[in-house]
Every structure is written in C-alpha cells, then in structure tokens.
Image: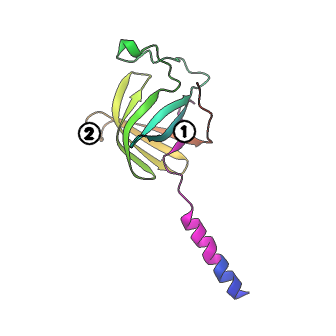
Amino acid sequence: MRLITLPLALLAATTALAAPTPGVRGDWKTPTSSIVRIASCGSDVCLTIIKLSPTAPETTDNKNPDAALRNRSLCGLTVGTGFRQPDPGHLADGHLYDPKSGHTYRGTITATGDTLQLHGYIGISLFGRNETWHRVPATTPCH
C-alpha cells in the first residue's frame, strides 16, 4: 500500500505544480459591470471592451478629446494598449484609456487569482488611481 501511495502523491504534486496560473489574460468585469478582454494584439497585450454594462450611461466615446472619435461605439473599443508582459501575472509599460473622462494614463496591471489590480497614473507611478476588476467566464463579444 505504501508503494502505491508515494507515486500517487508525487503525481498529484507534480500535476498541481504544472497547472497554469490564470494570469492577466482573459475576461474581466469592471466596477461598472462592463466586460473587458485582455489578450495579445501583435507583439503587445491590449484591453478591449467586449460587453457594455446594461446600465451604462453612455454607449459612445463622447468624452474623447478628438471630436472625430466621439461617435465611435464603446463596444469593441480598445482601452489598454502597448502593454508588455514580464510574467503571466503582470502587465507593464502600457497606456489605459478611460472613456468616462476621455483621459489616457500610463498603467500597470497585476492579477492575483481572480482579482485584477489596475494602476493608472500620470508622471510617476507613486501617484495615480487603482481599480479592481474580477475574472468572469469567457464572454461572447458584442458587435
């Protein structure tokens, strides 16, 4: 019995260690209940709104500083660009666009399990704003 238990325990430990950490990529619910997908876009990682909250007060990018872009839909809008991924749980050196204000910030993103911490800032990262998102199952994108 002991000879069987040891190999099974080693197999279980090896399987647990080999299980991938979910990391930052995937679909995430914002505090306003919209869904944002984090995925590759070329050599970078980007964030794209794939589902608007049913209670979203706006459906277009009407706060954009570029008047020519104010009529574009928020559904499908890329709100995070230029991120590099130093490891599965982090994104760095990117830019976050806030359609509620029309401002773009430098940003970092850290995943811990099913929680995502975004930090947007201007200038140095010591100052800025944090926001927490939560992982959701894969969501069908809006059109």
* Distance from the alpha carbon under mark 1 to that under mark 2: 26 Å
How has the structure been colored for display?
rainbow
Residue 18 part of the magenta segment:
yes
Q: Secondary structure at mark 2?
A: loop
Q: Quadrant of the N terminus?
A: bottom right
- The number of discs equals 2
Residue 64, position in %: x, y? 39, 18
Q: Residue farthest to the right?
A: 1
Numbered circle sitting on residue 28: 1
Of marks 1 and 2, the one in the foreground: 1
Asked whether, in this view, residue 14 is left or right of residue 83, the answer is: right
Q: Which residue shows up at 68% across the image and 87% down it?
A: 3
Q: Residue farthest to the front?
A: 42
Q: Which residues are magenta?
A: 9-34
Amino acid type, callout 2: Ile
Asked whether, in this view, residue 26 is left or right of residue 7, the answer is: left
Amino acid type, callout 1: Trp
Asked whether, in this view, residue 126 is left or right of residue 141, the answer is: left
Q: Secondary structure at mark 1?
A: strand
Q: Which residue shows up at 55% across the image and 30% down it?
A: 50
Residue 141, position in %: x, y? 59, 31
Residue 59, position in %: x, y? 53, 18
Question: Crowding at label 2, few (<14), some or many (≥20) Cα neighbours within 10 Å?
Answer: few
Mark nearer the N terminus (1 vs 2): 1
Q: Which residue is mark 2?
A: 124
Q: Which residue shows up at 45% across the image and 53% down it?
A: 88
Residue 103, position in %: x, y? 36, 24
